[in-house]
Amino acid sequence: MSPTTSSIIITSLATGTIITASSYHWLMAWIGLEINTLAIIPLISKKHHPRSTEASTKYFLTQAAASALILFSSTMNAKYTGTWDITQLTTTQSTTLLTMALAMKLGLAPTHFWLPEVLQGSSMSTALIITTWQKLAPTTLLYMTTNTLPTTMILMMGTLSTLVGGWGGLNQTQLRKLMAFSSIAHLGWIFTISSMLTNIMLLNLFIYIIMTTTMFSSLILLNLKTIKDTTTLSTTSPTLTIIIALTLLSLGGLPPLSGFIPKWLILEELTNQNLLPISLLMAMSALLSLFFYLRLTYTTTLTLAPNTTMSTHKWRFTQQTKTTLISTTAPLSLLLLPTTPLLT
């Protein structure tokens, strides 16, 4: 892909998200979402492989259906209330439709089936964009409309997403699919808390994006695709091995790492609201996710494939890729816990 094409596509991606985030009219928000969707499709399908073509088709169909639902929901609301203001969504049918549409956009259960397939058919860098940047526009709509959306439906879908994200990742060997189920679980936590405290929702989104960026940047840097690839990692790059292991533990939500902050605050708030069954289910689902993170941590740091040569070190060539992104996000992925009072 030529630099001109790449810059146009990336600019369109940024523009679509900014239009949606800064709009108060439903049509402008819908236009932003459509620009966003159309801009990422060339990035998904640029490998010219049947799998990437299939992934881009699946992505287009689900996102177009979700955008149509958003348009249908806002039109129905405008018919009954006479306003196109995003914050004035009041009719029951509109709020239910919008909740389903946002769940489909974000890849939440039970409309999550497209996400693992699309990530598996994309390149690692495109998968990074889909799991981070592409979540911003729907989350801003969720942020603006959360007071009017059905709370019971949000709690049920959020809890189901954390469970599906935990169960789905258990049987995966492909790292992109594993990260897709990780994304489903994390967005379940974000979706659940959105109906109570939006500041914790934004904090959770911020930490999730940082941790996912660190993880994907490491996978891109070391060209890792499956769990098997991680077994010889300690001989290639000891520093990155430690970073990946700690980031995985942070994604699992273990203290004293950054990933513990959102889980701690969300479970605390759910308990304060007397939602004990939901908080128990979500805590148990976090253990499911933690299992596959720990399994990956084990293969990364504690195994070494049988060596046929006398040397235990693989050849290390001059690093061609930039490490600026990972050196920025890795400390934030691991060391934010002491700053919790400042962040909330």
Image: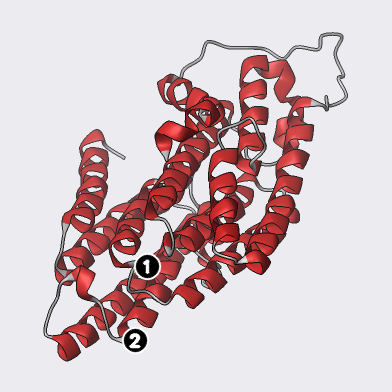
Give the color scheme: rainbow, by chain, secondary structure or one colour.
secondary structure
Closest to the observer: 112 or 259?
A: 259
Q: Check the picture and name the quadrant holding the C terminus.
A: top left
Q: Check the picture and name the quadrant holding the N terminus.
A: top left
Looking at the image, can residue 172 be seen? no
Using a 10 Å C-alpha cutoff, classify the residue at mark 2 as few (fewer than 14 neighbours), some (14 to 19) or many (20 or more).
some
Q: Which residue is mark 1?
A: 63
- Amino acid type of the residue tagged 1 in the rendering: Gln
Q: Position of residue 182 (x, y in %)?
A: 60, 51
Q: Position of 62 compared to 318: left or right?
A: left
Callout in the foreground (1, 2): 2
Dot 2 falls on a residue whose secondary structure is helix
| 1 up-or-down from 103: above or below | above
Looking at the image, can residue 36 be seen? yes
Q: Position of residue 31 (x, y in %)?
A: 19, 65
Q: Residue at x 30, y 57 (%)?
A: 140
- Amino acid type of the residue tagged 2 in the rendering: Thr
| 24 up-or-down from 40: above or below | below
Q: Position of residue 225 (x, y in %)?
A: 63, 40
Q: Residue at x 38, y 49 (%)?
A: 199
Q: Which residue is mark 2?
A: 92
